[in-house]
Amino acid sequence: MIEPTLANSLIQKLDFAIPIDIVGALYLDNNYYSITVVNNHIENELQSPQFKKVGQFELNQQSYAILQTEPTSTEKETDPTHILTERELEIAILVALGKQNKHIAKQLKISEWTVSAHLRRIFTKLGVGSRAAMVYRCSLLINQNINSGS
């Protein structure tokens, strides 16, 4: 899932000819998706150059459509892959794995001071104040890298 501010941005940017009930948004494999309630009278109206319908499912006798959307420049600016350097992403992954600064420094062959400097820049860029918040903010990216063995 994506964080609420990003989901709200995604929902607000969609412009439909008729009212549509978007109930959620997610970011998966570098793509943005909206989940919307599908009523009989709007099913054929799901046409927009801003998105394409990629799926539909039913849950508790209610139909939902999955709409793929293009990220806005604001969303790109909040995506860690667009705002952090490769080294900063590497450090975020090591922090997520529970490594302390001294272990990160040893592994990357840099000083502990450099690790701390990278972390301060990461915190500033992501607008967070702790290691835990940084890991949460980068969780999708970190999970992808950990699962791919990088």
Image: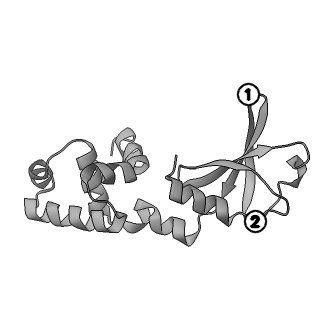
Amino acid found under the numbered disc labelled 1: Asn
Q: Which mark is residue 148?
A: none
Looking at the image, the residue that sits furthest to the bottom is: 73
Which residue corresponds to mark 1? 60
Image coords of residue 1 (percent x, y): 52, 46
Amino acid found under the numbered disc labelled 2: Asp
Q: Could you say whether the residue bearing mark 2 is in a helix, strand or loop? A: loop
Q: Is 41 above or below relative to 16?
A: above
Task: Name the residue at 67% across, 66% down.
Answer: 13
Task: Name the residue at 11% across, 48% down.
Answer: 103
Q: Does 77 sit left or right of 53 as displayed? A: left
User: Which image quarter: residue 31?
Assistant: bottom right
Give the camera-side residue of 106 and 122. Answer: 122
Task: Name the residue at 11% across, 61% down.
Answer: 110
Give the camera-side residue of 42 and 79. Answer: 42
Between the C-alphas of marks 2 and 1, the distance is: 27 Å
- Asked whether residue 38 is in view, the answer is yes
Coloring scheme used: one colour
Looking at the image, the residue that sits furthest to the top is: 60
| Among numbered discs 2 and 1, the one appearing first in the sequence | 2
User: Which image quarter: residue 143?
Assistant: top left
Which residue corresponds to mark 2? 15
User: Which image quarter: residue 83?
Assistant: bottom left
Dot 2: few (<14), some (14–19), or many (≥20) neighbours within 10 Å?
Answer: few
Image coords of residue 97 (percent x, y): 25, 42
Image coords of residue 69 (percent x, y): 66, 58
Dot 1: few (<14), some (14–19), or many (≥20) neighbours within 10 Å?
Answer: few
